Amino acid sequence: MNIEEAIRTRRTIGRVKQDPVDRALIERLLDAAVWAPSHFNTQPWSFIVMSGEGRARLGEGYARVAASLVPELSGQELEDRLAKERTKAYRSPVVIAAVCSPSDDPRAVLSEELAAAQAAVQNLLLAAHANGLGAIWRSGDPMYNPIMNETFGLAPQDQIVGLIYLGYPDMTPPEPKRIPATAKTVWLV
Ligand SMILES: Cc1cc2nc3c(=O)[nH]c(=O)nc-3n(C[C@H](O)[C@H](O)[C@H](O)COP(=O)(O)O)c2cc1C
């Protein structure tokens, strides 16, 4: 698949099979990710790959964040709620947390550091698609909660920019909708 075909045919795939994904294949995706551009070549990204029981860490993060938000719950009600949160981490056989650790280079700009890490995520998504995998880039409030950083042993200034749920597709994605580039472009000539 050439690059333009991969870009045009990639879709968010939110439902995947639990079949395992070869470690060597995941390593290939990560290798594609790290070829993203970054201003001053700071390469501010890093990745936490979770599979099998490794996903429990993310489940714990979801549960700890949820617990902090419902101090009124206790007993069985709280346990049920936390169990539900933990299951979220098991929606795919592999979950990759993409982290931006902003450079301390005084020239570095935070928005650009985040942009670089996000570009790395797009590389990863495209490589996943080109290799027959389905993926969804998930985010949401729990991901941005400082408790999630703590759970992964990340520094306060680190930012998780995406939770990439990966696996072999178990759905046909809906018809893609895109506003054509012509409607998004002004030419100054
Ligand atoms: C930064 C970012 C965060 C996203 N977070 C979520 C999410 O939390 N849940 C979700 O269902 N999709 C999420 N998405 C995926 C978008 O919903 C999806 O890319 C969009 O609907 C376009 O569909 P496509 O990827 O198939 O082209 C996210 C995408 C980006 C770029």
Image (tube, rainbow, N blue to C red):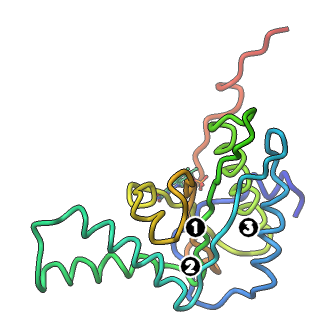
Q: Amino acid at mark 3?
A: His
110 is higher (above) or lower (below) than 51: above
Decide: marks 3, 2 in contact (CB < 8 A)?
no
Quick one: 32 or 147, which is closer to the camera? 147
Q: CA distance from mark 1 to mark 3?
A: 10 Å
Q: Secondary structure at mark 2?
A: loop
Q: Amino acid at mark 1?
A: Ile
Ligand 1 lies under 8 Å from the Cβ of mark 1: yes
Quick one: 120 or 60, which is closer to the camera? 60
Earlier in the chain: of badge 1 and badge 3, it is 1
5 is higher (above) or lower (below) than 109: below
Decide: marks 2, 1 in contact (CB < 8 A)?
yes
Q: CA distance from mark 3 to mark 2?
A: 13 Å
- Percent of width and height locating residue 64: 33, 72
- Percent of width and height locating residue 100: 64, 54
Residue lying at the far right in this picture: please name it.
2
In the drawing, does residue 27 fall left or right of residue 168?
right
The mark found on residue 16 in the picture is 2
Give the residue at x 38% y 55%.
141
In the drawing, does residue 75 fall left or right of residue 19?
left
Q: Residues within 10 Å of mark 2 (few under 14, many from 20)?
A: many
Give the residue at x 48% y 57%.
139
Q: Residues within 10 Å of mark 1 (few under 14, many from 20)?
A: many
**Residue 163 placement: quadrant:** bottom right
150 is higher (above) or lower (below) than 89: above
Residue where numbered disc 3 is placed? 129
The mark found on residue 13 in the picture is 1
- Percent of width and height locating residue 150: 45, 66
Q: Amino acid at mark 2?
A: Val
